[in-house]
Image (cartoon, coloured by chain):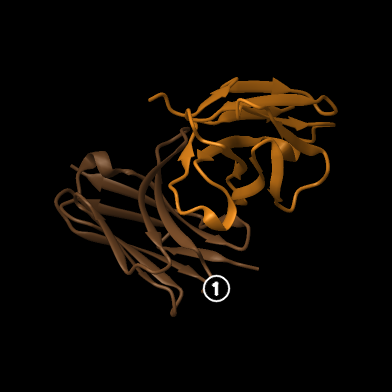
Chain colours: A brown, B orange
Amino acid sequence: KQEVTQIPAALSVPEGENLVLNCSFTDSAIYNLQWFRQDPGKGLTSLLLIQSSQREQTSGRLNASLDKSSGRSTLYIAASQPGDSATYLCAVYHGNQFYFGTGTSLTVIP
Amino acid sequence: KAGVTQTPRYLIKTRGQQVTLSCSPISGHRSVSWYQQTPGQGLQFLFEYFSETQRNKGNFPGRFSGRQFSNSRSEMNVSTLELGDSALYLCASSLMSGARNTDTQYFGPGTRLTVL
């Protein structure tokens, strides 16, 4: 069964710092990997989608990489802002469904 | 373009009752997936519907069921509610389904179900 792990579970950084969130998965037979953010009590907002044949995707201050063979993905956030405070989830499409990690709770301190 | 909408946003039920949740996908999207989110288990896949047919199902008991209508709107039903069913129920829509799902999933705000 596919298992998705995210490290760290929580992270607190001062505003302006660059940071990296990690996601690992146990079965490399994935179709794609998606990063989401979730604000308290709300649904998920898609940030980046990486197809299995791609190595990375970029959107603004966000860059996500995918190393399928090692079962890892990273989400790089440049010049963090207080508005980036949220829980970040990664999900992999494997078999017939998405499998989600448990998330990294990010707090950016002004 | 309107996003994914879910109704109701909040529900309080008692054990043994049943509940129906509704999800309206983004216009043109034919796939609707349902997820349960709890602090202990995180986000877990319930099932996916595409063109009114259940395509995939997660590891949940038969008390959890769903359906999809011709306009792609979907409903999820939970019968004989248990305390452990208290969770945030999220639905997500996308253009396609399954292995052809190279599209982004768009999530609704969720329905917060509390079982007393």
Q: In this view, does A50 lie above or below B45?
A: below
Q: In which quarter of the image is the N terminus of chain A?
A: bottom right
- In depth, the one of B5 and A18 nearer the eye is B5
| Image spot of residue B48 (x, y percent) | 65, 44
Q: In this view, does B64 lie above or below A27?
A: above
Q: Is residue B18 above or below residue A73?
A: above
> Residue visible at 53% across and 30% down?
B25
Other residues around mark 1 within 10 Å, as few (<14) / some (14–19) / many (≥20): few
Q: In which quarter of the image is the C terminus of chain A?
A: top left
- In depth, the one of B10 and B39 nearer the eye is B10
Chain letter for mark 1: A
Q: In which quarter of the image is residue B47?
A: top right
> Residue visible at 77% across and 32% down?
B78
Q: Quick check: A76 left or right of B54?
A: left
Q: Quick check: B63 left or right of A109?
A: right
Q: Quick check: B56 left or right of A92?
A: right
| Image spot of residue A91 (x, y percent) | 48, 56
User: Mark 1: which secondary structure?
Assistant: loop
Disc 1 residue type? Thr
| Image spot of residue B93 (x, y percent) | 52, 38
> Residue visible at 39% across and 45% down?
A46
Q: Name the residue under label 1.
A: A26
| Image spot of residue B42 (x, y percent) | 57, 50
Q: Quick check: A100 left or right of A57?
A: right
Numbered marks: total:
1
> Residue visible at 48% across and 33% down?
A41
